[in-house]
Image (tube, rainbow, N blue to C red):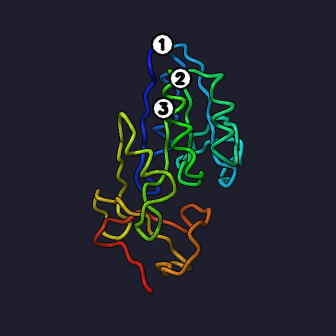
Amino acid sequence: MAKGSLTVITGPMFSNKSGELLRLATVHRIAGRRVGLFKHTLDDRYEGADHISTHGGQSAEAEPVGGSASIGLLGTSYEVVAVDEAQFFDDGLVDVCAQLVEEGLVVLVAGLDRNFKGEPFGPMSGLMAMADDVMKLRAVCMKCRSLQGTMTQRLIDGRPAPRSSPLILIGAAESYEARCRDCHELPD
């Protein structure tokens, strides 16, 4: 049996990672493949925990799961497994994706590569290291308007959040914006 492949879609918030994930899933469906969409239960924005939704309004029904083991169990009934918000999953997601690829599945994973502090986020660095393809997307920096937005800026009352802020805060434009490296701020 032929082995599968792993594609990782990453970048800051507002770089259309979920949109690209949904686009690739649609291409596989058009090709006649059984596609399973999964997302972490932590993300309940927009249409709720049972949909992958983009900031631009696209959405698709997805299976909400709380850990990587569930993807390993449920994913084997598909030919293509697509996982959104991968940064929220446990480090076991790396091994689960590796196992699914060994079993011949196409695995698509989207998630933030860095947290608001600019540090590697969850299992993303391990996933990128073993990926066959990494799509690193950019966004518009909302401070200088360059097309070099590679960082996620967390905001509290419109100001950069301090380093001591909690690592995970589910939100959208009210709490985050894309920034370039020069405009990203992290006060102590």
Q: Which residue is mark 1?
A: 1
Which amino acid lies under the numbered mark 2 shown in the image of this protein?
A: Glu
Label 2 or label 3, whichever lies nearer to me, is: 2
Q: Are marks 2 and 1 in contact (CB under 8 Å)?
A: yes
Count neighbours of disc 2 (C-alpha within 10 A) and say few if under 14, some if 14 to 19, many if 20 or more. Answer: some
Q: Position of residue 170 (x, y in %)?
A: 62, 62
Residue 23: assigned label:
3
Q: Earlier in the sequence, mark 2 or mark 1?
A: 1
Compared with 163, 96 (above or below) is above
Q: Which residue is mark 2?
A: 103
Q: Position of residue 161 (x, y in %)?
A: 50, 78
Q: Are marks 2 and 3 in contact (CB under 8 Å)?
A: no
Which amino acid lies under the numbered mark 1 shown in the image of this protein?
A: Met
Give the alpha-carbon distance from disc 2 to disc 1, as whole Å. 8 Å
Quadrant (top left, top right, bottom left, bottom right) of the C terminus: bottom left
Count neighbours of disc 3 (C-alpha within 10 A) and say few if under 14, some if 14 to 19, many if 20 or more. Answer: few
Q: Earlier in the sequence, mark 3 or mark 1?
A: 1
Going by the image, does 166 lie left or right of 118?
right
Dividing the picture into quarters, in which one does residue 39 lie? top right
Secondary element under disc 1, as helix, strand or loop, is loop
Q: Determine the residue located farthest toward the bottom in the rendered image.
A: 188
Compared with 178, 92 (above or below) is above
Give the alpha-carbon distance from disc 2 to disc 3, as whole Å. 23 Å
Give the alpha-carbon distance from disc 3 to disc 1, as whole Å. 27 Å
* Residue ID at (52%, 36%): 97
* Residue ID at (37%, 45%): 129
Going by the image, does 7 lie left or right of 36?
left
* Residue ID at (36%, 41%): 135
Which amino acid lies under the numbered mark 3 shown in the image of this protein?
A: Arg
| Residue nearest the viewer, comparing 68 with 165 | 68
Q: Position of residue 89 (x, y in %)?
A: 59, 51
Secondary element under disc 3, as helix, strand or loop, is helix
